[in-house]
């Protein structure tokens, strides 16, 4: 069962014989205000192709700091705010199925602190979650550097596409 079902008390979506990759944007207790959501979803699908990973379905769930803090406590036993939590739900060798939770509050704060637009920061965080699903890590210094370089690469490509 997908985590969104438990977290939002919604009935799980049972999907069988999925033949198309999909990116889904959902709101928990905060919604994402962003122009060009369909273009962004298509770009994320292309990101997985460029990284040579088969995509099944990834659901991005946009929420508040408090909502994501509770998920962090319940599922990861961490008691701190974060901007993103990625849950891979597929087995090795299977198309990627996942849920990615993003705190809109944290993204807004990060954008202000970094001096970048909300759109830039939310796209960076969205790509960050996808890159985790492609196997990129960010615990060690070298991993963080690689992750940032990949985020920047995909931000540039996306900005070029939508300009």
Image (spheres, rainbow, N blue to C red):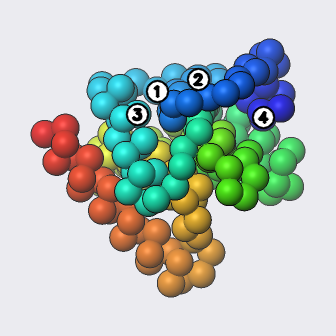
- The residue tagged 3 is 41
Dot 3: element: helix
- Mark 1 surroundings within 10 Å by alpha-carbon count, few (fewer than 14), some (14 through 19), many (20 or more): some
3 and 2 marks in contact (CB < 8 Å)? no
Dot 1: element: loop
How far apart, in angstroms, are the residues tagged by discs 1 and 2? 7 Å
Q: Residue at x 58, y 23 (%)?
A: 27
Locate the N terminus by quadrant: top right
- The residue tagged 4 is 3
- The residue tagged 2 is 27
Dot 4: element: helix
In screen coordinates, is 129 left or right of 85?
left
**First in residue order: circle 4 vs circle 2:** 4
How far apart, in angstroms, are the residues tagged by discs 4 and 2? 14 Å
Residue 32, numbered label: 1
In screen coordinates, is 70 left or right of 142?
right
The image shows residue 99 at horizontal and vertical percentages of 66, 39
Locate the C terminus by quadrant: top left
Q: Residue at x 75, y 52 (%)?
A: 91
The image shows residue 41 at horizontal and vertical percentages of 40, 33
């Amino acid at each position: 069962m997908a985590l969104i079902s438990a977290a939002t008390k919604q009935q799980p979506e049972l999907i069988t014989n999925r033949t198309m990759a999909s990116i889904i944007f959902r709101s928990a207790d905060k919604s994402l205000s962003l122009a060009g959501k369909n273009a962004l979803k298509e770009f994320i699908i292309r990101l997985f192709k460029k990284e040579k990973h088969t995509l099944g379905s990834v659901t991005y769930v946009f929420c508040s700091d408090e909502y994501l803090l509770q998920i962090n406590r319940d599922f990861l036993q961490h008691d701190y705010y974060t901007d993103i939590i990625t849950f891979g739900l597929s087995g090795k060798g299977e198309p990627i199925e996942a849920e990615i939770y993003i705190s809109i509050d944290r993204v807004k704060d990060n954008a202000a602190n970094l001096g970048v637009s909300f759109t830039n920061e939310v796209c960076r965080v969205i790509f960050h979650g996808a890159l985790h699903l492609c196997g990129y890590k960010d615990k060690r210094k070298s991993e963080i550097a690689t992750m940032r370089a990949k985020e920047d690469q995909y931000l540039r490509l996306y900005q070029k596409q939508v300009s």
